Image (cartoon, helix red, strand yellow):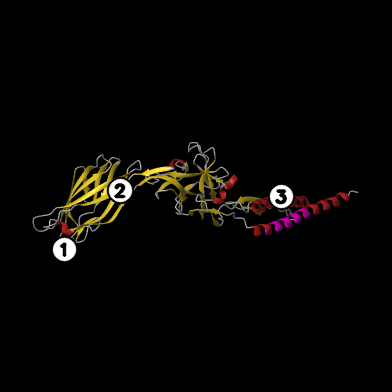
Amino acid sequence: MSISSSLNAGVMGLNSNSSRLSAISDNIANSSTYGYKRSQVDFSSMVLQQQSSAYAAGGVRVTAFKDIAATGSLISTGNATDLAVSGRGLVPVTDNTGVNSLSSERSLMMLPTGSFYADESGNLRTQSGLFLLGWPANSDGEIGNVSRNSGTDLEPVNIAASQYTASPTSRIELGINLPADATTAGGTGESYTLPIEYFDNLGRAQTLSLEFSPNVPASGSSNAWSVEIFDSAGDPAVSIGDLAVNFSDSAVNGGRIDTGGVTASNGATYDDTTGTVTLNLPHGDVEVFIGRPNDSAGITQLSANFSPTSVSKDGAPIGDLQSVEIDENGYLQAIYNTGFRRTLYQIPVGDVPNMNGLKALDGQAFRVSAESGNLYLWDAGTGPVGSIEGYALMESTTDIAAELTDLIETQRAYSSSAKIVQTVDEMLQETTNLKR
């Protein structure tokens, strides 16, 4: 019994060290593979029930696993769609079959890093055939409510539909000073015109013209202005709103819009809580911020020249897609030749309770298993997961020096196990020779 158990232990030692050698071979072969997670083997002893008169060798068994929780160093690249998770977590991907499948039927996998490029259909994919997944953004760049416990709301990231885009103007903010002397008796009554460019829903540039006319009294100061608003989208330009604006001359609020000092008509409306005038343009309503009563922001009337100190607007003309970038929060943005940026997708970062329990697949991909626990999709850089780095790839977690050291140890251990088998064979041969 003792001799046969020794032989069994020797054979198990050979098998265990063979498994370790296989893991080392994989690690060394993938030492330059981006995103590769080092394979490891864990030896554990086996103990047989012992008798007082003899000892029985139990041997050893091996458990192989990948150290998926380990992270490699990040290196910079020149490709904007090279991305890596800086820290814990993986990005969602799918295979070629899942691109055109329903989300419920799609194969969901996870990847620590990837060099993505746009294929002939505009989908971002790796050379190994894994397609990046993300949550699509609406026209305002918002993601909305999405499922974080599954890939139900994930879609293949596609940039083909974003080759051209136009963003219509929805808000204009004015910072203007009107000369106080213009509303005093004896003023010339000269009007001041301010043209403001805006963009319609087809990306065409249009012009709003605001004509400020002072109300000149017979004596004293009126501190009142009439504002007529014209839109160049009409043919000819048409008036789309009238404002009557009165300014305070008090010691505290002098030069600011007076309480109840704005009256809107001819299609325009004014909200004194937000300080905005709503205009009905052909492509939709546009809010124009002119200022709240008794507030220094917006339009003022001070003893200075007519000065449009700050005029800003949102929206952008039609533009051609130049490039895409992914920021640290996982937002994939399209950048157009007009300088306009538009959020297309948010790339989440997946996490599971037991990272090392994930099932390893080809191409450095992993899949959720019973041992890993349930998947949760985080915003990049929140909770336990790291941020997403663009222009970067993650190096292999293999340490060549450590692997070569383990290789020497494995060779010695294998030779020793083989020596046990040889010794047991010689002892059994001696036992056989006793019969001669």
Which quadrant of the view contains residue 183?
Answer: bottom left
Count residues near mark 2 (Cα–Cα under 10 Å), then give few for <14, some for 14-19, many for 20+: some
Q: Is residue 245 magenta?
A: no
Residue to which mark 2 is pinned: 197
Q: What span is in magenta?
A: 405-419
Whether 14 is drawn above or below 104: the answer is below
The residue to which callout 3 is attached is 15
Q: What amino acid does circle 1 point to?
A: Ala
Answer above or below: position of 266 versus 383: above
Front-most of 218 and 67? 218
Mark 3 or 2, closer to the camera? 2
Q: Is residue 409 magenta?
A: yes
Kindly state the secondary structure of the residue where label 3 is placed.
Answer: helix
Q: Nearer the viewer, residue 433 or 201?
A: 201
Can you name the residue that lies furthest to the left here? 218
Indicate the position of residue 107 as horizontal and vertical percent values.
53, 40
Which residue shows up at 58% across the image and 54% down it? 395
